[in-house]
Amino acid sequence: MPELMVDLIVSLDGWAAADGWPGLWGMGGPDYFAFLGEQEAHTTLMGATTYRLMSGLADEEPEAFAELEAMDKVVFSSTLTEPLAWANTRLVADDPVEAVRGLTQDGPSPLRTLGSLTLARSLLVAGLVDRLRLVVFPVINGATGRERVFDGYPDVRLELVESRTFDGRLQLLEYVPTVLDHPPLS
């Protein structure tokens, strides 16, 4: 069965982005970009908002997004219509949880989310996430933060399985998540 990884970038205080800050908080560096280029082939899962953003960026900078362009992508949306302009992209209007459940049983390659906080949350709540990978950027966006990453999440116990530092400042933390019905007994 293909593994499902939720892959998120986050500020130290839990924001996915911040008003007025550049992408990756202006802190993407050569180690981090090299790591992104080393990723195994996978199917990328995203929602409509992320699709619109990423496909627009790919139109502006095709060489920077060539690898993602070539990958299989699945977009979950009830607002987009086919045909989608971005190559190798399939639109799914059905329930994302059920569609991903099918992909994890029958799919040919690992699955990974790209942004798409609502999608990531629903997959975690459904117990479908095998790995939760965070790249923590060393900024606090108390005044400008946008899109709280973990709002609406259930209680989740995390087992650290990998950690790494990029460019002397970015922290990769990879966990195996276990969704809890209640706090653990002491």
Image (spheres, rainbow, N blue to C red):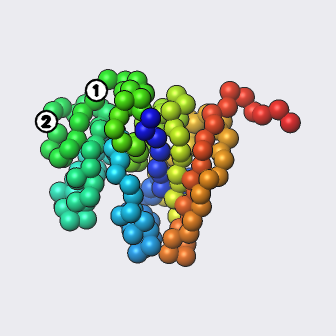
Going by the image, does 172 lie left or right of 59? Answer: right
Q: CA distance from mark 2 to mark 1?
A: 13 Å
Task: Reply above or below: 104 against 68.
Answer: above
Q: Quadrant of residue 61?
A: bottom left
Residue in view at x 82 percent, y 32 percent? 185
For the image, the number of numbered tags is: 2
Q: Amino acid at mark 1?
A: Ala
State the SS at label 2. Answer: loop
User: Which of these two is toward me, 145 or 45?
Assistant: 45
Q: Which residue is mark 2?
A: 83
Residue 144 appears at what percent x and percent y? 49, 58
Q: Residue at x 39, y 68 (%)?
A: 33
Is residue 51 in sight in this rendering?
A: yes
Q: Residue at x 40, y 24 (%)?
A: 98
Q: Give the mark nearest the N terminus, 2 or 1.
A: 2
- On the rendered structure, is 2 left or right of 73? right
Q: Sort mark 2 into few (<14), some (14-19) or many (20+) by Cα contacts within 10 Å.
A: few
Q: Which residue position is annotated with label 1?
A: 93
Give the residue at x 46% y 41%: 3
Q: Is residue 46 left or right of residue 152?
A: left
Q: Are marks 2 and 1 in contact (CB under 8 Å)?
A: no
Secondary structure beneath label 1: loop
Which mark, by number, is residue 19? Answer: none
Q: Position of residue 44 (x, y in %)?
A: 34, 45
72 over 95 or under it: above or below: below
**Residue 139 picture quarter:** bottom right
